[in-house]
Image (cartoon, coloured by chain):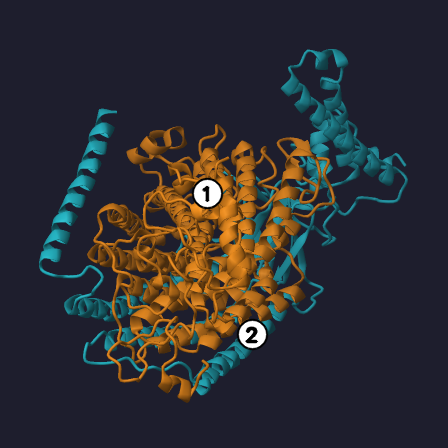
Amino acid sequence: MSEHTNNPAVEGHLGHEVHESHAVHHGHDDHAHHGHDDHGHHHKETFITKYIFSQDHKMIAKQFLITGMFMGLVGMMLSIFFRLQLGWPGQSMPILETFLGKWAPDGVLDPNFYLAAVTIHGTILVFMVLTAGLSGTFSNLLIPLQLGARDMASPFLNMLSYWFFFLSSLLMMVSLFVETGPASAGWTIYPPLSALPEASPGSGLGMTLWLFSIIAFIVSVLMGGLNYITTVMNLRTKGMSMTRMPLTVWAFLITATLGLLSFPVLLGAGLLLLFDRSMGTSFYLSDIYVSGQALEQTGGSPVLYQHLFWFLGHPEVYIILLPSLGITSEVLAVNARKPIFGYRAMIGSMLAIAFLSFIVWGHHMYVTGMDPLLGSVFTFTTLLIAIPSAIKAFNYITTLWKGNIVFTPAMLFAIGVVSLFITGGLTGIILADSALDVNLHHTYFVVAHFHIVMGVASMFGTFAGVYHWFPKMFGRMMNKKLGYLHFWVTLISAYGVFFPMHYMGLAGVPRRYYQNFEFFSGFSDLNMVISIFAIVGGLVQLVFVFNFFYSIFKGPKAPQNPWNSSTLEWTTPVKHLHGNWPGEIPTVHRWPYDYSLPNGEERDFIPQDEPLSEKEKQAEPAH
Amino acid sequence: MLLNLILLAVVLLAIITSARLLMVFQFAAELRGKKAHEISESENNMNALLTLLSLVGLFSMFFYLTAVYYNEKYIPGAASEHGVEVDSLLNLNFYVITLAFFITQILLMWFAYKYRYNKNRRATHYAHNNKLEMIWTVIPAIVMAVLVLKGLIVWNHTTNPDPDKNTLNLELYARQFDWTARYSGKDNALGKASYTMINEGNILGLISSDAIQEQLSIVRGDSLVTDSTVTLGFLPAEKLDQEKTRLRRLIHQIRTVAEFEYQFKSGTESYAASHDDVLVRDTIVLPVNRPVKLHMRAQDVIHSAYLPHFRVHMYCVPGSETYFAFKPITTTKEMKQKLNDPEFEYRLYCNNICGATHFNMMLPVRVVSEKEYAAWLAAKKTFDDETKTRLAKMGLKTNFANNH
């Protein structure tokens, strides 16, 4: 494989760098097909090594982003399919038959496919979009650029990480086309439903593909995570101490750590499920009678699976949310022209949230028959998370206070993240309480809660990141007017879809119901309104996709530092080159948030690589 | 097909047109000397204003939805003893989070509006303030401490109700896709059950001497149907595997049932508690003001017994038994009057995804006076009656019980 030839060259860079953080790199030029002749390797970047099997972190970031966007569109379409059924139950929708064929006979969604759509929507959004699409994109793009590194610690592993993600997405897509339908046991795939093809057609080949897809995904996350952590620990440029790192990098570091510690548990859970499915083991199966036969398996526990799953599942929530909060910190500070308020408290609260996220998984299981005492413990630990979360929310708000706020599309999305984080976070206080969760478990209240705080908030964080760093990724600007349209319609439809769901949940409407009974008929209007908001919200994402691809090719050229930001990524040339900086890697002299210092200068920011002025040296050298 | 092609063409045309338009706008802006990355004052002010307006929108939505949907009609007050406590705890939580919601959203959006960009102003470099941060660490901590404490008290009451000799033992049995309720009968004890005892007549797999006899006759008969190497030899490979699995499972089942037979015949177990159990599959009837302990089991996959009006919810897990105890305090009749809805019914829902018609898995629940309950139950056939009827149909003797 040709990409191997590239590898020593890159390692060569890094080898220099570790020893002398300002290694000089000659031979990089701005031309598209440049080589690494200075290292004595006869290597030309071909289309394949540059765009497909690339080892450049910037290209890999783009690969993650575009794959994530594609998967996001698929996930969104599935949600619109099931929203059509929920808004207008039983009504014939020819569009469903066009897209789904036999899964929507006469334009009415099949109940089995409804569950499949719900399942795959959840899986794609949680894993492919908000884990890989978000973390994969921005960790890859920003960690080396903001830390002053030439590339990731292991570019080859980084490339593999993307290709395992690609394989995972591919398997998930393939599972949509199998005869018995894709996995349909909910994205949490609780056994025995997911273990028994007799119990649900989706638990046949569809579930096998789901499991293999997730296994590939875990491999991808682990390779990516190892790389992110190693890079942050070892490849920071001279002067870039841990407490001078932008909060984005802190967020990515903590996220990668969470992933590294929790995803292997999901791998274990998935493997045991595979054994139960195909080898007759009974980890999760016990005393089951299905399709006229009593299975031999006894002694297993389906609840064991839930413990294992949620041991990943809860940290996963923060794997999704923290990068988005990191991006928000950065975008808020840059566009409010102020330092982020309480930098150290922000790091501390992220660490606290990350730690706590490992000891709260049981709050997903209050009604599984778990010992009530355990329920009390999990209530206590879960409600503790409210404290660091409150610190973050108030610090964001204070960052805006007395700022000089520039409303770029990215800034709007970042403010949206804070609003959604608060709205969704507050209902978490109710769900964390075991006594209250009993009646709300698996209702629309939960759907509302996690979509707002984790789904939409993180999606907004992703959008903020894309609008903010698009000039860095593609050297061009996105159209801001379309950005505004995208933001406002998305914000309105996000709240329009999920806010009313709280009320349905309080009335006891269960989630994952193909249709609601007469008992819930009072909500049929509301269901219709929700579906309309969902469709509008879905359509406006096409504006974003259009803006994105149009701007890659035809957007106005970006200046080097369009947002007057002080972080290192904006010191690299607009035109990408493998190795990031044409000359020496910049040295860092200050923290990343020197905005609007009262120093009498007209300029309201000082880049991180600018040495301290005489005055500053006298006053207080270290931040 | 043609329609789809035309549709595709229209979409493509729309994309190309938008792209062209955008290029024109972009060119025009460039001519006017505007830079793409700079936000003009009017754009900035407009977005600031919209941010402020979105606050109005958010709160209007909150008030409208609360006025219309947060009331007795949609969320009837709890019809169980612990549910009343749960409701008041929920209300307390709602006051707290609504207050926090208002304060934080107002601050956020107001600051965003007020401190919108002004070229004559410079942002205040304000990096941290330990006192402020301490305030918003300590206040949420105190509030959380109160909520945790209150929550745990209610949780304890919910999960550890005062013991009551009068408690009714009732089993909820879930399978794809229906519910069966089992009343414990005169002895108020639920008879033993095993999944290997399940057959078409005995869907809960209850064990009694007659049921053992019935099951043995069924499974032993089953095994003979294709149990010859000649038959197996003619099966295609895939079918052969299925048949092998079926036989393996059957042998396991016969062994287990034979063990029950042995236990019974040797006198170790009488399996008598199930005799007076009553199985109900159309409506659950509960006496008012009497504690009920629900024993939950499932046949095939995880189901979940959800009784929203009673604030009761518990998974039904294959392979183990789960419990939930509560005391209904409002009869169906009273609730109908209270809600002024003659159609009102309490209901039991399945609330854990369990397969295709999960959404349709429910059972009405009726809460009645003790007297009505007793009359209703007395009219029901016991498990023993039902088994004896089935055995008679199969031509088997029902005096198996006397064998030892």
Is the residue A239 above or below the residue B75 in the image? Answer: below
As drawn, the label of residue A120 is 1
Is residue A228 at least partly visible in the picture? no
Q: Nearer the viewer, mark 1 or mark 2?
A: 1
Q: How would you rate the neighbour count of disc 2 (Cα within 10 Å): few for under 14, some for 14-19, many for 20 or more?
A: many
Is the residue A287 above or below the residue A151 in the image? Answer: above
Instruction: Count numbered badges in the picture.
Output: 2
Give how far across and how far down residue B341 sits, in percent. 39, 57
Location of residue B235 (image quadrant): top right
User: Label 2 sits on what residue type?
Assistant: Val
User: Label 1 sits on what residue type?
Assistant: Ile
As drawn, the label of residue B148 is 2
The foreground one among A611 and A56 is A611
Q: Is residue A205 left or right of residue A374?
A: left
Chain depicted in cyan: B
Q: Secondary structure at mark 1?
A: helix
Chain depicted in orange: A
